[in-house]
Image (cartoon, rainbow, N blue to C red):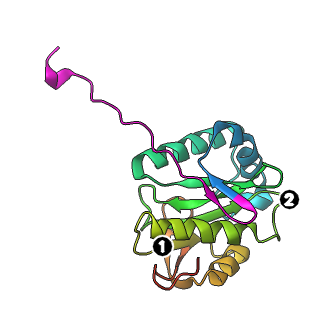
């Protein structure tokens, strides 16, 4: 076989860091976390701002895509783990698939973890990591116009509504701009 036909070496996948906060651990996605994500993704009242209801096999595809996103970009969605119980409490991190306007700080909290400040605490940690370690100059959050809870959290994080645009996956979406690295709360 000539060198031109030799397979290219594949780099080892990017390992997500482990970030600890007072109540949470942000860590890389693991297949053991899939069922908690799939339960969220199958619940119409809970996943509306994230995308359409999906059966388990489509959630499996999304979960594996998230793992691949870490490999391609060096970042992605962390699993939010409750320090007290070890249970997956949701996901947060930086998302930028093809067709996205720019890197997005996103969050999802699973059933039983809402109303406890989990999304806020996790998103602050993920945003700080994105600015301090990745060196990203800005972040947005893309929010479906009807998702009032996510818009309230974005505002609490200091983000402001910048514009409405057409998201290739979600349709009409609002782009919320976060404060830059110098101004952002950690």
For mark 2, does the 10 Å Cα neighbourhood hold few (<14), some (14 to 19), or many (20 or more) residues?
A: few
In this rendering, position of residue 13 left or right of residue 113: left
Q: Are marks 1 and 2 in contact (CB under 8 Å)?
A: no
Residue 143 placement (x, y as % from top left):
60, 72
Q: Quadrant of residue 125?
A: bottom right
Reply above or below: 129 against 164.
above
Taking depth in this image into account, of 55 and 150 the one nearest to the observer is 150
Q: Magenta span covers which residues?
A: 1-24
Question: What label does residue 63 carry, if any?
Answer: none
Which residue is at 46% across, 70% downward? 131
For mark 1, does the 10 Å Cα neighbourhood hold few (<14), some (14 to 19), or many (20 or more) residues?
A: many
Residue 85 placement (x, y as % from top left):
83, 51
Which residue is at 64% across, 83% downward? 155
- Residue, disc 2: 112
Question: What label does residue 139 carry, if any?
Answer: 1
The C terminus is located in which quarter? bottom right
Q: Is residue 8 magenta?
A: yes
Residue 97 placement (x, y as % from top left):
45, 55
Q: Quadrant of residue 22?
A: bottom right
> Which residue is outermost to the top?
1
The N terminus is located in which quarter? top left
Q: Main secondary structure of the magenta part?
A: loop
Q: Could you tell which of marks 1 and 2 lies nearer the N-terminus?
A: 2
Q: Circle 1 sits in a helix, a strand or a loop, which is it? A: loop
Taking depth in this image into account, of 156 and 27 the one nearest to the observer is 27
Which residue is at 63% across, 76% downward? 145
Which residue is at 53% across, 58% downward? 169
Residue 132 placement (x, y as % from top left):
46, 69
Q: Is residue 164 magenta?
A: no
Reply above or below: 83 against 104.
above
Q: Circle 2 sits in a helix, a strand or a loop, which is it? A: loop
């Amino acid at each position: 076989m000539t060198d031109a036909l030799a397979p290219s070496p594949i780099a080892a996948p990017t390992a997500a860091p482990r970030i600890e906060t007072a109540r949470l651990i942000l860590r890389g996605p693991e297949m053991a976390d899939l069922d908690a994500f799939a339960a969220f993704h199958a619940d119409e009242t809970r996943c509306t701002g994230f995308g359409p209801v999906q059966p388990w096999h489509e959630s499996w595809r999304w979960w594996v895509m998230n793992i691949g996103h870490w490999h391609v970009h060096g970042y992605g969605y962390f699993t939010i783990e409750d320090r007290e119980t070890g249970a997956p409490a949701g996901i947060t991190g930086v998302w930028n698939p093809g067709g996205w306007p720019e890197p997005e700080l996103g969050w999802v909290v699973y059933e039983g973890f809402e109303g406890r400040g989990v999304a806020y605490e996790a998103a602050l940690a993920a945003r700080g990591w994105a600015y301090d370690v990745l060196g990203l100059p800005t972040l947005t959050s893309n929010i479906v116009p009807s998702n009032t809870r996510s818009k309230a959290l974005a505002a609490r994080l200091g983000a402001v509504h910048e514009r409405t645009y057409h998201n290739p996956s979600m349709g009409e979406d609002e782009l919320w701009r976060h404060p830059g690295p110098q101004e952002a709360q950690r």
